[in-house]
């Protein structure tokens, strides 16, 4: 669906990888997009699609571990564009430490970035959406939340599973205010992160494990985000949409 209105979308962890693909898809769909990331250098390298006016992109340094960071980002967005309408919680931390080697500090770190950011981001932006009577929250979960996969770390899988539940909680809380809250659960994607966490020999075998025979396209995840962000998507809330190539069927 296209979005003819100049709605404002905010994407966390958007300077690269899946977050950048989602931000790019939203820009192509007509949104103004606040591209946020903890890395100022990565933000500086973010390239908007050709033909996108510079005033439709706002880059913001955001540490998603801090509620104050979300509050400051929202204030800057409102000051720049008057309101925010869509929040995509994409920021995530991946650690591949074996299960019995995960230290409590590492577990807390992953849960804070992956789950805590969804909670505080949804609190801050959800209150803004509630007060204005409209909004869309889109959370990036994972196949690991559904099949208990630990290739990306048990703490990563646990955080993504909790995101699916938190999506339902916020969906019920905000439904009457005209705010929908949904999640996307991708399977293995063709992104640089996958090449960073898997040895080349293991990476080569991944497509053969996927029923459709290939890695997922992060651009397609961006299109799903656009669907959920659309003003016409008012009757879908509390859902998790799978995009895993058939690895998990329900």
Image (cartoon, grey):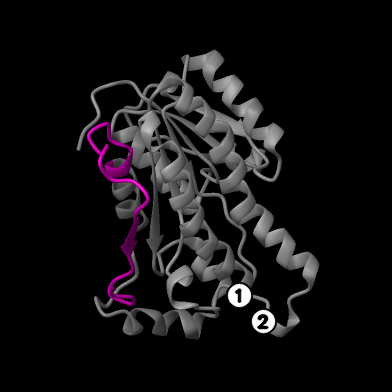
Distance Cα–Cα, label 2 vs label 1: 6 Å
Q: Nearer the viewer, residue 182 or 86?
A: 182
Q: Which residue is label 1 attached to?
A: 154
* Residue occupying the point 46% across, 27% down: 130
Tell me: residue 104, above or below residue 124: below
- As for residue 175 lying within the magenta part, the answer is no
- Residue 154 position within the rendered picture, expressed as x and y whole percent measured from the top left: 61, 75
Residue 99's mark? Answer: 2
Quadrant holding the N terminus: top left
Tell me: residue 181, above or below residue 247: above
**Position of residue 59 in the picture relative to residue 62 (left or right):** left
Residue 250's mark? Answer: none
Residue 179: in sight, yes or no? no
* Residue occupying the point 43% across, 52% down: 168
Q: Quadrant of residue 190?
A: bottom left
* Residue occupying the point 51% across, 70% down: 195
Residue extending farthest to the left is 1
- Residue 123 position within the rendered picture, expressed as x and y whole percent measured from the top left: 57, 37
* Residue occupying the point 33% across, 52% down: 219
SS majority, magenta: loop
Lower sequence index among marks 2 and 1: 2
Quadrant holding the C terminus: bottom left
- Residue 183 position within the rendered picture, expressed as x and y whole percent measured from the top left: 40, 53
> Pointers 2 and 1 in contact (CB under 8 A)?
yes
Tell me: residue 104, above or below residue 239: below
Region in magenta: 227-250
């Amino acid at each position: 669906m296209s979005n003819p209105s100049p709605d404002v979308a905010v994407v966390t962890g958007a300077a690269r990888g899946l977050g950048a693909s989602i931000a790019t898809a939203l820009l192509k769909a007509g949104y103004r997009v606040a591209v946020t990331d903890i890395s100022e250098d990565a933000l500086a390298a973010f390239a908007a699609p050709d033909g996108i006016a510079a005033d439709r992109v706002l880059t913001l340094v955001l540490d998603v571990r801090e509620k104050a960071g979300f509050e400051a980002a929202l204030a800057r967005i409102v000051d720049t564009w008057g309101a925010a309408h869509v929040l995509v919680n994409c920021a995530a931390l991946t650690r591949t430490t074996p299960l019995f080697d995960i230290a409590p500090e590492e577990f807390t770190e992953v849960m804070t970035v992956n789950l805590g950011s969804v909670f505080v981001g949804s609190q801050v932006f959800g209150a803004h959406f509630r007060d204005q009577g409209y909004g869309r929250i889109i959370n990036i979960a994972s196949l690991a939340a559904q099949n208990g996969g630990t290739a990306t770390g048990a703490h990563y899988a646990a955080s993504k599973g909790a995101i699916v539940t938190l999506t339902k909680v916020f969906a019920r809380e905000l439904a009457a205010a005209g705010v929908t809250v949904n999640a996307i659960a991708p399977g293995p994607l063709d992104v640089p992160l996958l090449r960073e966490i898997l040895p080349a020999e293991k990476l080569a075998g991944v497509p053969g494990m996927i029923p459709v025979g290939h890695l997922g396209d992060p651009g397609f995840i961006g299109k799903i985000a656009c669907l959920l962000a659309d003003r016409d998507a008012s009757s879908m809330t509390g859902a998790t949409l799978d995009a895993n190539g058939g690895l998990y069927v329900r």
